[in-house]
Amino acid sequence: MGGFSKTITGRVVLRVDEVEKGLLVSLADQVCEFVSPEPRESADPLAAIVGIDMEAEFPDDPAMARLFPDAYPDDPEAALDFRRFTQRSLQENKLAHARTVLQTLSKSGEKITLGAGDVPSWLGFLNDARLAIGTRIEITEENHEELADLPEDDPRHGMFHVYDWLTYLQESLVQLLLPQK
Amino acid sequence: MSSQLDVASPETVTAVDRPWITLVWNDPINLMSYVTFVFMEYFKYDRAKAELLMLDVHEKGRAVVSNGTREEMERDVAAMHGYGLWATLMKDD
């Protein structure tokens, strides 16, 4: 298993085996489901077009709250306003990233070649998936070893290893994108 | 948006026209390299400045990454949320 690499002509490539590819498809599906905006029957159609969601509330789910944090920590009213004017478009952007990843995967074999336009979506998807999983397993800067040593029957065991792999993938992609010093 | 109207009202217009700041907060998930990349890509900071800000976030728990009008800072915060960074805005007073 390797991370992302660049070809001589600068194309970004990821080689995966069948299991890893299946895992990426499944993760992108889950991210799609997770970030999809809730349908609003009462929504003003014009407001919906410009991404305004007057029914948005602070999310109960910690992973959602991490992906869409309060912009004004000391001003709940302004925070809610901000959420109503931004969250829906942010959700739609994240959904578009995950869908692009699914498209790339569906037309690739075990060698995945990213078009230049696909790179931001892959980067965004990897980060969103890590934020969601990392929040679920309650990762901190100190508990990596503890999570890595969990027994296999602990539900967080598998999630941690997926998280760790996504971290490796994301790091390899970022290193390709950062200009050389 | 009501919050933008507030900025234009006379009592909140200050001599310094850029009184709002965007803060990025430390979190255990975002990679140091990724945070540097985001600061370079979105704010067009050079690598040295982006890395200094990233290290401030990592070591001090937060950093001021931009300043401007309230409207500009709301745009920056929304962009940071788009990248998955934990960002907030406040008036610098």
Image (cartoon, grey):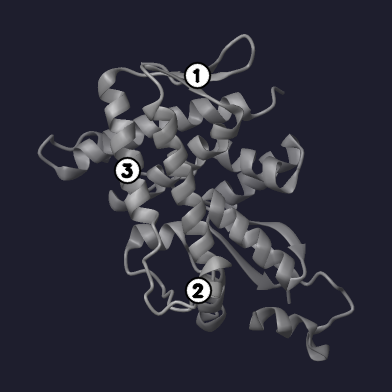
Residue assigned mark 3: A29
Percent across and percent down for residue B65 are: 69, 55
- Of mark 2 and mark 1, the one earlier in the sequence is 1
Return the chain for callout 2: A
* Up-down relation of residue B32 to residue A75 (above or below): above
Residue receiving disc 1? A13
Q: Chain of mark 1?
A: A
Which residue corresponds to the image point at 73% horizontal and 48% vertical from the top-left? B43
Q: Which residue is mark 2?
A: A45
Circle 3 marks a residue in which chain?
A
Residue A29, image x, y percentages: 32, 43
At mark 1, the secondary structure is: strand
Q: Nearer the viewer, mark 2 or mark 1?
A: 2
* Residue A143 on image: x %, y %: 32, 43
Packing grade of label 1 (10 A; few <14, some 14-19, many >=20) is: some
Residue in the foreground of this view, choosing between B91 and B3: B3
- Give above or below for B77 relative to A56: above
> Secondary structure under badge 2?
helix
Q: Are marks 3 and 1 in contact (CB under 8 Å)?
A: no
The reply to whether residue A145 is visible in this rendering is no
Q: Please tell me whether residue A100 is drawn above or below residue B57 in the rendered image.
A: above
Identify the residue shown where x is 78% and y is 85%: B12
**Total residue callouts:** 3
Q: Residue at x 83, y 83 (%)?
A: B13
Q: Quadrant of the C terminus of chain A?
A: top right
- On-image quarter of the N terminus of chain A: top left
* Badge 2 or badge 3: first in the primary sequence: 3
Question: In front of the other: label 2 or label 3?
Answer: 2
- Label 2 Cα neighbours within 10 Å, binned few <14 / some 14-19 / many ≥20: few
Residue extending farthest right: B15
Mark 2–mark 3 Cα distance, whole angstroms, equals: 27 Å
